[in-house]
Image (cartoon, rainbow, N blue to C red):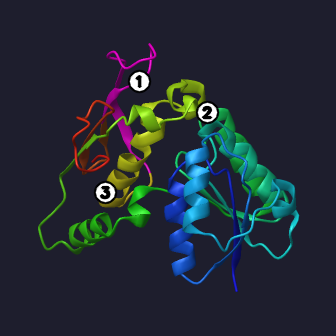
Amino acid sequence: MVRFAAMGVDHGQVYDMTEGLLAAGAECAGYNPDTTDPRVLAGFRKRFPHVPEASRQSLVEDPSINFIVLSAVPCDRAALAIEAMRHGKDVVSDKPGVTTPEQLIEVRQAVLDTGRLWSICVGRVSSPAIQEAVRVVHSGEIGRLVQVVSLAPHRLNRELRPSWFFDRPSYGGIINDIGVHTIDQFLAFAQTEQADIGLSSIGAFGTEPEGVEDCAGRVLATPSVRGYIRLDWVAPDGLPTWGE
């Protein structure tokens, strides 16, 4: 049986990743309870009472564990992923997997050095709606794809956010944080691994503390497809979903 462990219980995405892996037949061998958000930890314990707690070191050194699931503070994910890979583990990271270009270089080098797999769990992976939309577009049944428009309002839920959420070095900026979902979707729809950035804008329009990036837009292009992405953290609190 494939066995995994969870490290960095700092974001609620760890619930979805763990539930999905368990449903697929994997076994969760343990989790490290170190966290910056006790509410996320309490939620993990409630959802998975059968999963034992363990130290980070014991999890990465356990030879019976095949891979590590990461949902730590975004700026810490690269270092944890590298540590896991150098201990012979594959890695499934919550998005974003890195927060700086330098971290990406270091992760890529660790992949080359170790031969391990490093992957990012973006929204497309867990969204049946997006998967079906991609299938329909690729089938050609609605014609040739010309443009993709993605509008992604998000509720701030300020009272539920830990302090690192408002610190740009910790989350890597709005496009890196939540824009990664929509950029990945554009690439999937366009059936390409790269696109040109024609325009990119970021705004800080008053979300406290001062300087928090709360709105962004980006234009993407391939030789045959154009894309427009808009993101924000200024959606009404009454929105019945978290966003998008």
- Are discs 2 and 1 less than 8 Å apart at CB? no
Question: Helix, strand or loop at disc 2?
Answer: loop
Q: First in sequence: mark 2 or mark 1?
A: 2
Residue 203 vs residue 42: left or right?
left
Q: How many residues crowd mark 2 within 10 Å: few (<14), some (14–19), many (20+)?
A: some
Circle 1 Cα neighbour tier, 10 Å, few/some/many (<14 / 14–19 / ≥20): many
Visible residue check, residue 120: no
Answer with left or right where residue 48 lies relative to residue 58: left
Q: Which residue is mark 3?
A: 190
Q: Tell me the CA gap for discs 2 and 3.
A: 26 Å
Highlighted range, magenta = 194-218
Residue 16, percent from left and from top: 49, 63
| Residue 93, percent from left and from top | 60, 55
Q: Residue at x 88, y 63 (%)?
A: 61
Q: Secondary structure at mark 1?
A: loop
List the residue tagged with mark 1: 213
Q: Amino acid at mark 2?
A: Thr
Q: Amino acid at mark 1?
A: Glu
Badge 1 or badge 3: first in the primary sequence: 3
The residue that label 2 is drawn on is 100
Q: Does label 2 or label 3 sit earlier along the sequence?
A: 2
Q: Residue at x 46, y 38 (%)?
A: 160
Q: Nearer the viewer, residue 127 or 227?
A: 127
Checking the image for residue 87, the label placed there is: none
Q: Residue at horizontal 35%, vertical 54%?
A: 185
